[in-house]
Amino acid sequence: MLSKPLLTIHEVADLLKMKESTVRHWIRDGDLRAIKMGRDWRVSEKDLESYLNAHANKPEA
């Protein structure tokens, strides 16, 4: 069983203060991993965190 529930596109967009269309674009382009459940997409918190970490600015050494 999942330890944390999967997030809907609406929940991801709300968390990040972005439009749902942007989140859908990330999923469609394969940048954000998501699971299709019926007609809807779900994103795990772990996959969202991985996406954000991969796209974060890297501090200069």
Image: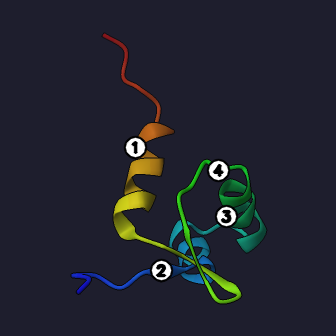
User: From the viewer's perspective, is the residue at label 1 or at label 2 nearer?
Assistant: 2
**Between 9 and 1, which is closer to the camera in this rendering?**
1
Kind of residue sitting beneath label 4: Gly
**Between 13 and 5, which is closer to the camera in this rendering?**
5
Please tell me in which quadrant of the rendered image residue 11 appears: bottom right
Rendering coords of residue 18 (x, y %): 66, 66
Residue shown at 61%/48% (left/top)? 31
Rendering coords of residue 17 (x, y %): 60, 69
User: From the viewer's perspective, is the residue at label 3 or at label 4 nearer?
Assistant: 4
Residue shown at 34%/62% (left/top)? 46
**Residue 30 tag number:** 4
The residue at which mark 2 appears reads as 7
Q: Earlier in the sequence, mark 4 or mark 2?
A: 2
The residue at which mark 1 appears reads as 53
Kind of residue sitting beneath label 3: Val
Rendering coords of residue 40 (x, y %): 66, 85
